[in-house]
Image (spheres, rainbow, N blue to C red):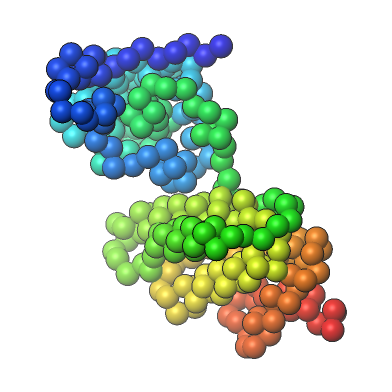
Amino acid sequence: MAKKPKQPKFYERAIKNWPEDGRPREKLFMHTTYDLNKIKFATDEATFKRAVGLYESGKVTEVEQLGGYYSALVLGTKSYRVSVSVRNYKHGHCTCYLGEKDTLCKHMVALALYAVMEGKPLSDKDKQLSHHAECSERRNTLSKEELVTIKRAIAESMRYIKPYRGSSRTWFANQDSLREGCNRLSAIVSDFPVSRQVADILVKLLLRLERKLSVGGVDDSNGIVGGLAGELVALLEEFARIDPLCIDAFEPLCRKEYCFGWEEPLVRILDERS
């Protein structure tokens, strides 16, 4: 069983100086503007998994809140002094090899996990990553309320897929934003049931991504958005196999030639059925 991390000193001070105003205890000292999902979607898979290992084995110790930063001693091959901003967990420092090169490392992510989880255990769902769109193979339709929630989540995720008009200094941050948006979308669509209703949503999402790249100024030279589009096409092919009624949703893809040719496998399925 993983060793339970001890409560940070700032937590003890917070409890000792607790005001009688009814505020939730844990919110007295927690001021992070990010949450667990932000960390999961904005961190590469390998770094996130290693950070989870550090956090769950109690390697994040001596946590303090110092102004706008959390600091800690994270135990690894050596003991590393680590800090992360309460506003952006990627802003901080670590005395490890990567940290000295201003690169986000597992020690920084582990401290960020401590900050948002307050030392509490992670559930299996908390640790589950979905950086690739997969088919759930469930067959049912969505309620009106579920549709509203899903469309809102897609719209929020699309905001991370931003055009790039900045200097070379901001290019990496822009690519990180694309990756986070695509990871968020992958998690959303991987939970979709199979139905014609959902196939319509996926086709519309595919066309929105196409517009982002063709006329929206998105720099996809790393292939992040294109990779997601390819996964959506494969997902729609699975939908067509499981429920042939989903093929009707492919009809809008026949109306014009698109820049990237993603639609071709789906148009071929539609043609073969006719």
Q: Position of residue 214 (x, y in %)?
A: 49, 78
| Rendering quarter of residue 75 | top left
Please determine whether, in this image, residue 60 is positioned above or below residue 106.
above
Q: How many marks?
A: 0
- Picture residue at 15% right of the left edge, 28% below the top: 21
Look at the image and tell me whether residue 160 can be seen. yes
- Picture residue at 28% right of the left edge, 37% below the top: 32
- Picture residue at 76% right of the left edge, 60% below the top: 238
Please determine whether, in this image, residue 12 is positioned above or below residue 251.
above
Please determine whether, in this image, residue 270 is positioned above or below residue 124.
below
Quadrant where the image shows the C terminus: bottom right
Q: Position of residue 162 (x, y in %)?
A: 39, 65
Q: Position of residue 99 (x, y in %)?
A: 34, 32
Please determine whether, in this image, residue 98 is positioned above or below residue 223.
above
218 or 274: nearer the eye?
A: 274
77 or 198: nearer the eye?
A: 198
- Picture residue at 80% right of the left edge, 75% below the top: 269
Quadrant where the image shows the N terminus: top right
| Rendering quarter of residue 158 | bottom left
15 or 34: nearer the eye?
A: 15
Q: Position of residue 146 (x, y in %)?
A: 54, 57
107 or 191: nearer the eye?
A: 191
Q: Farthest residue toward the bottom?
A: 255
Look at the image and tell me whether residue 111 can be seen. no
Image side of residue 96 versus residue 265, left or right: left
